[in-house]
Amino acid sequence: MADDVRVLVPATEWSKSVCIGPAVSTAALIQVEPEKEDDPWDLPELHDTGVSWADLDTQGKVLRVFRSVGKFILLLGLLYMFVCSLDILSSAFQLVGGKTAGDIFQDNEVLSNPLAGLVIGVLVTLLVQSSSTSSSIVVSMVSSGLLQVSMAVPIIMGTNIGTSVTNTLVAMTQAGERDTFRRAFAGATVHDFFNWLSVLVLLPLEATTGYLYHLTELIVRSFHLESGENAPALLNVITDPLTHAIIELDESVITGIATGDPEAKNKSLIKIWCRTSTNTSLQNVTLANCTRGMCWEWRNVSETLNIRKCGHIFVNTELPDLAVGLILLAMSLLVLCTCLVLIVKLLNSVLKGQVAKVIKTIINTDFPFPFAWLTGYLAIIVGAVMTFIVQSSSVFTSAITPLVGIGVISIERAYPLSVGSNIGTTSTAVLAALASPGDTLTNSLQIALVHLFFNVSGIVLWYIVPFMRAPIWLAKSLGDVTARHRWFALIYILVCFFLLPLLIFGLSLAGWAVLLAVLLPPAILLLFVVSVNVLQGRWPHALPSCLRTWDFLPIWARSLEPWDRVVTVVTACCCCCKCCEVAQGDEEAGPVNKGCEMESHNNLAMANDSEEKEKVPPPPVVLKMTVL
């Protein structure tokens, strides 16, 4: 019988001469065990490094209970400040760009272009950071007859895309750890991809058939509807005392600008008088351009009396709206990022051991067979209800993004929750439309139902059939890319939410011919690349041999590595310049810190040659042989 013998040979002697007898067996001389790679999308185990409950004495158990209750109260307080900072952020964006957003809606010639209407919805929602505000402007314009329902449908689609940028920005705050950032950015962009893919399918369908317009018109005419109550304010009852103590805006000013009110352009968005009274009296009014006869008549004249001023800190300020908006923008972003970082750290501290297992089990476990398919639809309902409670899809999706990053919620579960938030955010618009006067109720409710059925149609397309859930694997692919090249996340946000909408809006002003001539070739090229990538991964034999890989392209056209080196060199040069400036300023204080001296080497051996290190003997070579 053969015996296994292990021989340790130093590498220096191995390079000279090694005498090995003839091998009779066919066994390999050197065997390397392949290491199993961990899936980066697996939810991490949150280990409990503290003392177990059973090992604590009575005093330790009491202290742990008080500590847990304190952490829970602190978590609620941070969540409260997080939601309030989002509300202040929305107000800041309205002060900075609210009047511009109202002016954009006035150009009906541009709005007649569906693609231009789409990007206008995106840009306006980005300016005011609230899909509720932008959709309410659209509803007001439709109610007043300034905008037709068919022209407003693409704008409503654009508001869906614009509101998904907030949670994407929130994910950027978790860029410190690679795997956490991979999951957080994918969990945020799965909402983006759902909205973009829904628009890519439903906008051409709506432009050619009027699908959403005719469907909602049929539903509105089928019921005898009466004017209802205003939309309920659930979470706002809790947050308004703090946010209204900081700033309070007059929402009617933006709507007045959009509807063409000349007096609204000269008004400030900052609300001064919170309680007013309107008196109507019969007065003698002198007629203008009167040449003969009676030059006066009796008319009912309404007069507004100011009763009580608002109590926010900017009520008596003389600063313009732009300055106040910039102050609030900086303040809200600081509070938002601080709360988010503290929430993530607190969740990492709380979600340990059995607590983490219970929460992850409840959120990510499916129903038993054969009802497993119902789990996702329950998550959609939960997302819709939670969004209705907080009255903001941005708040809900931004709140679950850190949970996805730390591994409490999986991407597969975050997807239906985000989709459900799109449904929940439409319920407020529907209730608000029911509060419209009777003569404008039909049009207001129809455009609100357009928003609802647009999201329902997106769910039918991209969720009901499992293999059609393309937003999940697209978000994972983007998460992998941004985890390796984190600068690409910023490029994605700038291109998708700012540069591309601005480019399309500018081209739409030049007409359809210019728009198609510029955008059609890149769109065809992008479709071709995506199709070839799918075939390369699944059916490579269906492609010609030259297209089975992208190796025929230069390296900069098929990989981000060269661009990664460019970004690294640019940032290193900027750091070097700053360090050199500091060094020149501190020459009198002493020698320059070596941490400011940076060298860039493409080959690690070049960097090692410049340093004198001890020569460590190489490790021995292990030979595994079989002898008879």
Image (cartoon, helix red, strand yellow):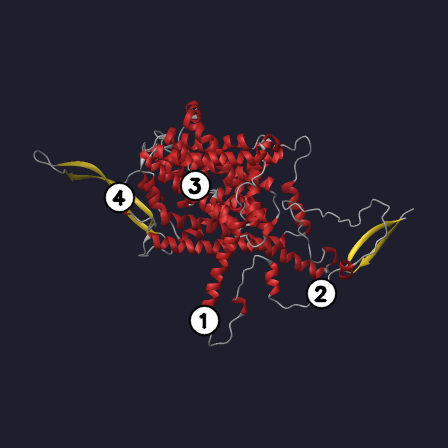
Specify few, some or many for label 1: CA neighbours under 10 Å numbering under 14, 14-19, or 20 or more: few
Nearer the observer, disc 4 or disc 1?
1
**Amino acid under label 2?**
Val
Secondary element at tag 1:
helix
Nearer the observer, disc 2 or disc 3?
2
Nearer the observer, disc 4 or disc 2?
2
Task: Tell me the tag on residue 616.
Answer: 2
Task: Tell me the tag on residue 584.
Answer: 1
Q: Quadrant of residue 211?
A: top left
Nearer the observer, disc 3 or disc 4?
3
Specify few, some or many for label 2: CA neighbours under 10 Å numbering under 14, 14-19, or 20 or more: few
Secondary element at tag 4:
helix
Q: CA distance from mark 2 to mark 3?
A: 64 Å
Q: CA distance from mark 4 to mark 2?
A: 82 Å
**Amino acid under label 1?**
Gln
Residue 329 drawn at (x, y percent)? 41, 53
Nearer-N-terminus badge (4/1): 4
Depth order, front residue of 97/61: 97
Q: Identify the residue under disc 3.
A: 131
Q: Identify the residue under disc 4.
A: 263
The reply to whether residue 400 is visible in this rendering is no
Secondary element at tag 2:
loop
Nearer-N-terminus badge (2/3): 3
Residue at the spot x=63%, y=32% of the render? 373
Specify few, some or many for label 4: CA neighbours under 10 Å numbering under 14, 14-19, or 20 or more: few
Nearer-N-terminus badge (3/1): 3
Nearer-N-terminus badge (3/4): 3
**Amino acid under label 3?**
Ser
**162, above or below 200, in the image:** below
**Amino acid under label 4?**
Glu
